[in-house]
Amino acid sequence: MTTPPDHTTGRRSLPLGNVTIDDDFWSPRREVVRTGTIPQQERQLRSGGQFEALRLGWKPGDPNEPHIFWESDVAKWIEAASYSLAKTPDPALDAAVDEAIGLLAGAQQDDGYLNVYFTVVAPGRRFTDLRDTHELYCAGHLIEAGVAHHQATGKTSLLDVVRRFADLIDREFGPGGSAEGGYDGHEEIELALVKLYRVTGERRYLELSKRLIDARGTQPFYFDLEREKRGTEGYFSFAFPDRPKEVQRFREYTQSHLPVREQSEAVGHSVRAMYLYTAMADLALEYGDDELRRACERLWHSITEKKMYVTGGLGSDPSIEGFGPDYDLPGIGGYAETCAAIGLVFWSQRMALLTGEGRYADVMERALYNAALSGASAEGTHYFYGNPLASDGSVHRHEWFGVACCPPNFARLLTSLEYYAYAEGGNEAVVNLFVAGSAAFSLDSGAVRLDIATGYPRSGSVSITVAPAETASFTVAVRVPGWAGGEAKAEVNGEAVDLASAVAEGYLRLQREWSEGDVITLELPLAPQRIWANPAVTEDIGRVALRRGPLVYCLEGVDHGVPVAALSLPRDSAFDTEVDEDLGIEAVVADGFADVAPHVGGDGDGDGDARLYRETPPDSRPTRVRAVPYFAWANRGQSTMEVWIRETAR
């Protein structure tokens, strides 16, 4: 991996093999992905036709026409499987991955092109509908898979395939190429090309990523030019019949309404935006591009201050799977696609690497533990596409989707958690997430291992044992979450650390001469906290959300005898916690009230008053309110759910 320029923080994530995760919270979930999720997704890809399509046997008139997305589904599954293989050898899985790679290699054309749809369904039309047909999106996921497979296994079989494809794209999108000046409608390849550059050292891949970023949103608008040349409205004209009349809205949909360095508001499709912003941060790091960095910071403010759900979910408008206006964050009617939360994890990590600021890792943690983790069921085989913050009881996870981007995205995130937990740069070892295990760093002063012991997020105690190869001076930077609110405590070898002076930009930075066996301890407050929304979020006025550490909580109807919308929580109620052994989590409990219809008759044993309206208020009866972590909801059957709870003054 290349070293970033000196004028950045110089941070980079650790190689996968340098990190061992042995964590009570994450290890069981990762094992579920290894033993349940990845095999189930392989079965879906085989039965759904994705594998078979790569044999190029489909002909017009045949059923199950290959879809424009299918390579991306296969690629993300390969990526997740590769990360899993890096940690746990599995001959059967290894053989299945090799089979998929063989099919991809067999489907690749002589010039390096690789996309089944444009090979057998629409031959001769490659790179003519970049706005709609996801060619470069699929190429990006293939490149990411090739890089991951090589880094995890040492093999080059898929890396060689994707390099040939990337070389073709470089030619076709370069001077005199058929798509000169073009860029993709669904961003993804840009961040993938940075990864390809870092693993191969070939700078032309980095330069191609920058060309695609620089071209985006410039005038004349490329998508207008290709539509005129093509003579049709594009692949998705059936889904967007109003697109010719809503030109600006649909330019924003693909973030191509302005050059990226001029963008200030997050608009359009939220997953596309996350992948674009991730690449922008990557390029800002590689090139020391202050304009790109400032654009990222403006867009970050737009999202985290005006458009992000309390869970870290993104995208409130289902009609575009994307961002609505500022402060428009509906609960039941929202969207919050799993892939968008995963994309926010990617972007947050890159911003933390770029700036060295802990506030970005705070958001990474929020999205990871809440909006992303909720994307799959406890047994790892059913999935949410959207992650609403309220449900009338009709919402449940599905085994698969016709557009199956979210399931393998979830799998590849959890199997690559190592990349997000730690970072290094110069003479600094960085702890971003509190995950038990160990991490090996290569610092200017020499090799260092950190051994982390913690029960996080069930416990706020974190112990970090420092083990340098030899006594040396360096910095250990440990994130102190913003939600800790100044109540965190730290010690080094039993001596208290003054956090007021030692914490900078969200990290406890401990620079000293370290010897083997030195111990850093961090105590984080995990008392449940109330959170209130800005009153501009009108749907949440008079409501409160609950948080314990990194976890956002919700109410489920399965825990109460009434729909959760009938529950309320007094502002002065005290909180307790209780262990839910079935879910393996801490529930938060408090005294609250339930609104119910008055009983008919004087003995209190009659049926509730069924009248639609009445002149007397409902009975407000004391009840125990029980909240569970948002990520765990919908694992005990369908029921009502709310994150934002009605609040009363008493």
Image: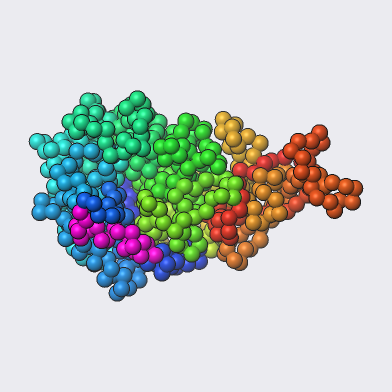
On-image quarter of the C terminus: top right
Outermost residue, right side: 602
Query: Is 532 displayed left or right of 186 in the figure?
Result: right
Extent of the magenta region: 40-59
At x 60% / y 37%, what residue is drawn? 540
Is 347 rendered above or below residue 383? above
On-image quarter of the N terminus: bottom left
**In the figure, residue 536 lies in which quadrant?**
top right
Q: How many marks?
A: 0
At x 51% / y 33%, what residue is drawn? 328
Residue 438 can be seen, yes or no? no
Outermost residue, bottom side: 91
Q: Nearer the viewer, residue 120 or 493?
A: 120
Task: Answer whether residue 44 is magenta in the image.
Answer: yes
Where residue 153 appears, as percent x and y from the top left, is 26, 66
Where residue 642 appears, as percent x and y from the top left, is 60, 46
Q: Nearer the viewer, residue 155 or 611?
A: 611
Classified by dominant secondary structure, the portion drawn in magenta counts as helix
Where residue 424 appears, as percent x and y from the top left, is 34, 54
At x 20% / y 36%, what residue is drawn? 182
**In the figure, residue 18 lies in which quadrant?**
bottom left
Residue 48 can be seen, yes or no? yes
Q: Nearer the viewer, residue 606 or 88?
A: 606
Is 508 rendered above or below residue 269? below
Where residue 8 appears, as percent x and y from the top left, is 31, 43
